[in-house]
Every structure is written in structure tokens, then in C-alpha cells.
Image (cartoon, rainbow, N blue to C red):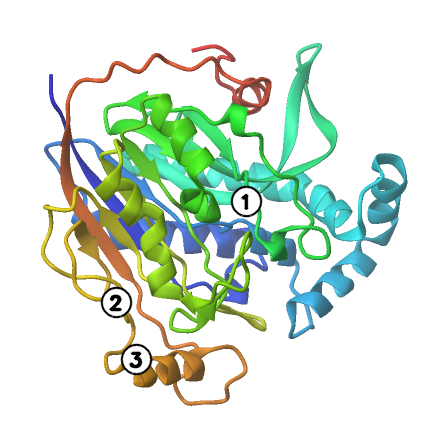
Amino acid sequence: MTRSFRAVAVQPQWHVDDFIMPAAFQRWMHTQLRMARPQLAQDRPNLVVLTELNGLPLLLLGGVRATTFKSAARELVLRHWPAVLRLMLTERVSAIRALQLHVAQVAVPLYLSVCRDLALSYGVYLCCGSLPMPRYRLEGGEVRRVSGVLTNQAVMFGPDGRLIGCADKVHLTPPEQAGGLDLSPGRLDELRAFPTAVGDLGVAISLDAFRADVIDCLREQGCTVLLQPDANGISWTADEGLPPDPAHVRPQPLAWLESSWQVTTSGQIRYAVNPMVVGNLLDLTFDGQSAITGRLHEGVLQSYAMTEPRGGFLALLPWAAQGTDEELREAGRVRTAGSGHPLENSYQTGVLTADLELPPSVVPEPTPTEHERALRAWLGEPTRR
């Protein structure tokens, strides 16, 4: 039987105040589903995809006086110094990773419970975005944390509130590596496709959607709907250069055509959903254009800012301004953190939808990982499905 469903991408704007208290984080997450509610289908299942690292700012729980992310990290390390030092010595990790592992004791249960409740309350399949997630295991019926491991992990729940599965980011950007957030890279062999009523879901977090090894891995496992949660930490109309060739500089929107759009217009993966968060968080800038993509002959002719119109975009959120390339570069610059311009932190938010169809799934249910079994136990679910 054909699977008919609605894909929904939410582009929110975040602010430090959304993360200083658990109740504030809960409100921010609920606001995103309330934004989506008028667009949810009543006659078919809904897939809602949220943005990358929307759980990272939970590091700021309790608030900070600092105005830059680096100084905030120093402030937080000092605030939690006894616990941070203990973890640094016992697990041989950096101060920033130790801080995140310590805060995870509060942040992870908060994140998981809020996201589970959202999926259940709104009756949707929910890719919750991602957060820095420790690795857990079941030991004698108890949930234990694996020493030292901290990945950028997406979590998915079904409309019944049950955990569908998790996916780690394999290819980390420089700010996520040592000297930055110091996250652990995910394992390529742990990426899987999850068969659901809203497609055979595969997750490629941000940079992973640009990498052939990740896309090939998901395609070979039968992925039909690619989920690309994103937090692009630079002005959308600025130039970028990323490994493996940082000298290959091009405008952000042009580079983005090499992720979800390229995956669905030139490969076997049928659809992709790419939500992007916007907003200035302390001194960091996040910007982009969320999109839902399909085959090249589908959708109306349109494209990202600073690129020529093309097929394949089933839904695309407009950028915050229009004009020539130079005008767009300036429009991006004045919106960045610390610009002092009246348009600083003025971005486009919104919700995208597309009604999609797929043939019946032939993808087998993947065996839960040890980590997934531990999270299910933590959430009070059966550890096997």
C-alpha cells in the first residue's frame, strides 16, 4: 500500500533566554510545534523535522554573564569546576567535553522528555534535531554512561511517543572538533534506515549530507527520506570553505546545493527534509534557508539565494532579503552578531510542508543499538521492539 504523508520542516530563531531554564526550553520547543500545527495534515501521518544542535545551548542552564560563547564556556567550566575536574582526570577528556558530560545529567533527560511529549501530544513522527549526547549502555538493568564519549546525535520519536532510533554525526566541522566543542565523531557503520509510515528514514546531520560515504551508506540500506537537521554557523550569504578543501571558497547557498538537493535530484534517495535554525546566539551567527527536495522535474523553478532557479525544490523558505549578490552579502553582514546595525539578528522564520508518496517499505527493522536499548529503558519503554 502506498505511503502518503506530509513532511514538515520548522525554521525557528533561537535566543539565549530560551535555554537558561528548563521551562524556557520547553516553551521554545513547544513553540516550534505550535508553528507547525496549522500545517499538519489531518488525513495522513506527519513527519516533523527540527534543527541541529537545538539541545546544545542547554549548556547555558542557569544563565551566564558572558557575551561570547568562549567566555561563556570558561564561566561555566569554573561554575562546575569540581565535577569538570573529576571528569577530566577520570575520563581523560578536555574541560569543554567534561563540562558537557556533566551538564548532560540534566540536559539529556530534559531534552528526551520534552521531545517525546511533543511527538505524543501532536501525534507526529518527530526528528527532534540533535544535541551533544553521551553514549549509554544497560548494565545489570541499570543505565550507565560510557566513559568519555559525546556525539552530535539526532533522536527520533513516533506519534505513540516511542523512540524510533538515534543517529550520530560522522563528519564534524572544525568548531565541533578538538579546540571547539570537542565532540566524538559518530561511526559510519552505525548509521541505519528506519522503516516508518513516513518513509524509510535516514539521518545525515548537516555536513554528513555533503559526504558521499554517509549518503552511500544510507542509500544502500534503503533510505527513501533523508533528514538533514542543520545549524549553519555563519551568515547565509557569506563565503565558506570546509574540509577536505578549505581553499575551495564559494557562497554558502551554492555550497548547499551539494547536500539534500543533490542527493534527491541525482540519487536513489527520494526526498530530503533540511530544516535550518537562525538567530544570533551570544557572538555566534546562524543563518540559512530550510528546504524540502525531490526529483529534478518536481517543484517549481526556484533555488537558494545567490543561485539560479532550478527544479527539485518541493518547498523552500525565502531568505531574509532580496537583491543583487552584493546587496545580499551586505544584508547578511548587517544581520550578524555584533554588527550594531538596526537589522542585527533579523532573520526569516517559518514552516515548510510537502505532501509526499512512497511505495511500501521493504526495509527491515534495524536491530537496536546498545545505546538505543539504554535510552528506551530510561524512557520506560521495552528495550526490544
Mark 1 lies on a secondary structure that is strand
Task: Look at the image and tell me whether residue 288 can be seen.
Answer: no
| Mark 1: amino acid | Leu
Q: Which residue is mark 2?
A: 307
Depicted 385 relative to depicted 253: above or below: above
| Mark 3: amino acid | Asp
Depicted 84 relative to depicted 360: above or below: below
Please tell me which of labels 2 and 1 falls first in the chain. Answer: 1
Q: Residue at x 46, y 34 (%)?
A: 213
In this orientation, which residue lies closer to the viewer: 12 or 295? 295
Q: Which residue is mark 3?
A: 325
**Which image quadrant: the N terminus?**
top left
In this orientation, which residue lies closer to the viewer: 382 or 330? 330
Mark 3 lies on a secondary structure that is helix
Q: How far apart are labels 2 and 3 at the CA level?
A: 9 Å
Q: Position of residue 175 (x, y in %)?
A: 62, 57
Q: How far apart are labels 2 and 1 at the CA level?
A: 31 Å
Mark 2 lies on a secondary structure that is loop
Q: Position of residue 269 (x, y in %)?
A: 27, 33
Which label number is shown at residue 131?
1
Dot 1 crowding, Cα within 10 Å, few <14, some 14–19, many 20+: many
